[in-house]
Amino acid sequence: MDDDKSDDDRKIRWVWLRPLTWADFKHNIRLMVDNDPSVLVEIYGGLAVIGGVIIWGEFFA
């Protein structure tokens, strides 16, 4: 079971190392979400944090 998981992780890492077009990027996200739906929550959480930092910088810098 653990061996299968590391193979999946290795595949995902390899996909992310390739130069990305927007279509590749969306496809990779879809693959990752299929493997582990909680990835989507992490992505949106990360975007929210980045957006918050940018907004904070605009108003208070």
Image (tube, rainbow, N blue to C red):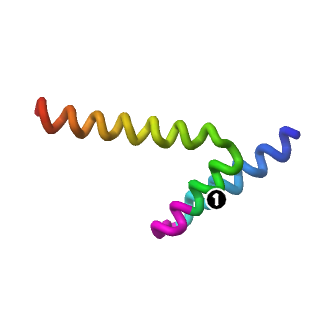
Is 22 covered by the magenta stretch?
yes
Q: Is residue 46 above or below residue 22?
A: above
Tally the numbered discs.
1
Q: Residue at x 64, y 59 (%)?
A: 14
SS assignment for the magenta stretch, majority: helix
User: Residue placed at 59% from the left, 59% from the top?
Assistant: 28
Name the amino acid type tagged 1: Trp
Residue 3: image location, x then y, percent:
85, 44
**Left or right placement of residue 46 versus residue 41 in this view:** left
Res. 37 image quadrant = top right
Q: Is residue 55 magenta?
A: no
Q: Is residue 57 left or right of residue 5?
A: left
Query: Which residue shows up at 54% across the image and 67% down it?
Result: 24
Frontmost residue, 15 versus 58: 58
Q: Quadrant of the N terminus?
A: top right
Given residues 11 and 32, the one toward you in this image is 32
Q: Which residues are magenta?
A: 19-26
**Left/right of residue 16 with respect to residue 21 in the rendered view:** right
Q: Position of residue 30 (x, y in %)?
A: 61, 56
Percent across and percent down for residue 52 are 29, 34
Residue furthest to the right: 1
Q: Which residue is denoted by mark 1 in the rendering?
A: 14
Residue at x-position 77% and y-position 45%: 6
- Vertical placement of residue 21 versus 30, above or below: below
